[in-house]
Amino acid sequence: MKKLLIILVLGFQFGFSQNKLPLIPYPNSVQQMKGFFVLTNQTVIQADENSFEAKYLKAQIKEITGLELAIRTTSNASSKISLSYFVKSIMTADYQYQLNVSSNKVVIEAESNEGFFYGIQTLLQLIPTNAKTQTRIQCLKIDDKPKYSWRGMHLDCARHFFPKEFVKKYIDYLAMYKFNTIHWHLTDDQGWRIEIKKYPKLTQIGAWRNGSMVGHYSEQKYDSIRYGGFYSQDDIKEVVAYATERHITVVPEIEMPGHAVAALAAYPEYSCTGGPFEVGKQWGVLDDVFCPKEETFTFLEDILTEVMSLFPSQYIHVGGDECPKTRWKNCPHCQTLIKEKGLKDEHELQSYFVQQIEKFVNSKGRKIIGWDEILEGGLAPNAAVMSWRGTEGGIAAAKQKHFVVMTPGGYCYFDHYQGDPKNEPLAIGGYTTVEKVYSFNPTPKELSVDESKYILGAQANLWTEYIPDFKKVEYMIFPRIMALSEVLWGTSNSEKFKDFQSRMLQQFSVLDQKGIQYSKAIFEVTSKTIPKTNSNDVLFSLKSATNSDGIRYTTDGSNPNFNSITYVSPIEITKSQTIKAAYFDKKDQKSALLEQKFYYSKSTGKKITLINQPHENYNSGGAFALVDGIIGDKSKFGRDWLGFSGKDLIAIIDLSKPETINKVLLCVLENRGSWIYYPTKIEVLTSIDGQNFESAVQLNVSEISDVNGEVVLDLKSKKAQFIKIIATNLGKIPDGMPGTGSDAWLFVDEIGVE
């Protein structure tokens, strides 16, 4: 068996520390030992001189320390780094790599080059960023391997285009934290980014749009600047080769049957209407999709043939999400096909479409993976599912013995805000903090041990409607990528987030050294409302990643300073007021200002019961969020609001004693671009005993739409202890509206009683 050796040798002993090492993802087993190894310019990398891993290690050490180490196949140098293959069958330890650092050598042992690469990443994290000509590395022994086989990050280059140099840099970031998959989103309504030689108009026409949205979707503003770009096949080969060296698989996504307008602008004959079409300027979902006729399948098969020649990945992503059925419903060919094939409806027509594509991809020895909408109408026999609308799709697929990659929006959408929106650059919405990502478990508890084997892993998605340049790409993924890496490696523990956080903060010096732009939202003063035990009051809890003892706050609406009230314990909310807080260090304000208004009413802090539970992606705070005294901020619908997909809000509040009720306030949200619609009706019912309810007042949709989301219902001095509020979901989204045919979202927040 060929051997690669890397040995660092030196005989000095230093102080011994058992502090947690700044490693992310944290290894499975770490044994710290006394002493240090010292890395100097006399250190030799003993390895195959043609080994990529050895060359990579040499380049990275030079970047960190400035040291130029030699690579030698054999060497008698007293200071070495050794990469050594082991034969797995004779090893008793169950690991992918082992790293041993002693006072006279460093050895990375593995069964494959991939294992060496991961061991090198761990070793590099042990080198201080302020390293000098002599650098100390803690003596230790690490046994390590990943839990999940799919450890992925996604990059959308269709909405905004990033040159190949930036894609390679993105791959470097994945490599740093031991990811092994990049999901490359190459086509959508707003742009076609991959050269297909048989169909040159895909890039001549489909790669360019005549303008883009400016600001948020809700503003409906556009510029008229021609925008676009694409990757040549040589570019693709270069990126794939670059990723392969770093043991990262590139999974391409070619969207179908929806998200196809850029392709149809170039080749309108593959649509239902014949066009003409323009590459999409508007974000979101557009109605025109591929028509499932024979010539369309030939067109797509030709495209996929060229795609598969460029990408050696086992899986080819075919999209399958957010496919409006409007055109199919009005297309004579589609309606005839539904009858000929004995299909129930357009959902089964989509399944038929995906199955035809799967047969072709399978015939080439590959497999398809698609977003969880491919479950609708029946899942293609060998398809894998990427579960994004929550975990339900992934659970259903795993129970059907299909492989699954989990990527639920509430945990894995890195285009969401990661801090208070007023302090963050524009994003699509949502609220996904580092801590939320770190709490994610890719394997749902609903699955049995056997079913759990079908969970390949997870990935985070970076959709780029609001990410126009690569610096913002960096900002949106860092530091959340660190949290996900540890989740996927299998060593995360949400109960020990502070331990992870301390290691993450130490990693920031690495990001600074590399010039990576990252979010500092972790340093903000963050808040949480919680019910007070054995009472009907609300507590407002504050914390800071740096030091909660440094938080100062006010309750009168004035800005805090170093001499304001020192935060010690959760603040009791007993009236309407505004609390402002910030973190101070040596009298200097170190964080952005946190400002929270409280609306106190007869329902604040009271017991509340929900008949239907919110969707897991939008369930921050649970039912208590509706009576915590905070009126939902329309820019933070992932944080303050509860979201119901296709379900009604049915809430019962116990006021604890009979009260005279004059008005009920309910906050509702509408953001049609995100498929969030006002309820069609709101009804309030009252009861003295909690058993017998009578209707007190109701409003229809026209009355709701006129109040900008804060609905006030007049009960005219009704006496009651229990209040039931029913907000009726729109249900299936009608034709011609964003999200046509899908379940509408109903977003609600504070319920106030006066």
Image: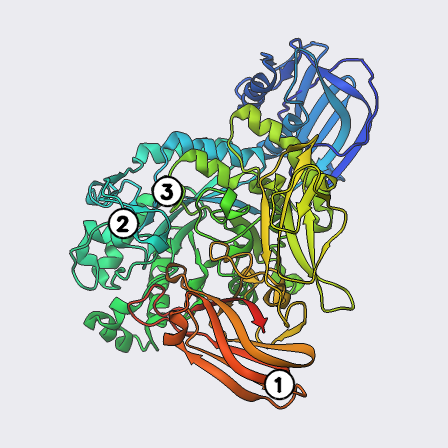
In this orientation, which residue lies closer to the viewer: 474 or 603? 603
Q: Quadrant of the N terminus?
A: top right
Query: In terms of depth relative to the viewer, which is nearer, 151 or 408?
Result: 408
Q: Is residue 416 placed above or below 295 in the rendered structure?
A: above
Instruction: Please give the residue where the numbered disc 1 appears in the rendered image.
Output: 719
Question: Residue 24 appears in which quarter of the rendering?
Answer: top right
Marking on residue 157: 3
Element class at badge 2:
loop
Question: Going from the N terminus, do you reach mark 3 or mark 1 first?
Answer: 3
Image location of residue 489, percent across then percent down: 63, 44
Residue kind at label 1, given as amino acid type:
Lys
- Amino acid carrying label 2: it is Lys
Q: Amino acid at mark 3?
A: Cys
Binning the other alpha carbons within 10 Å of mark 2 as few (below 14), some (14 to 19) or many (20 upward) gives many
Residue at disc 3, secondary structure: loop
Asked if residue 540 lies left or right of residue 248, the reply is right
Q: CA distance from mark 3 to mark 1?
A: 58 Å
Q: Which residue is mark 2?
A: 281
**Residue 272 pos. (x, y %):** 21, 64
**What is the CA distance from the residue labelled 2 to the residue labelled 3?**
15 Å
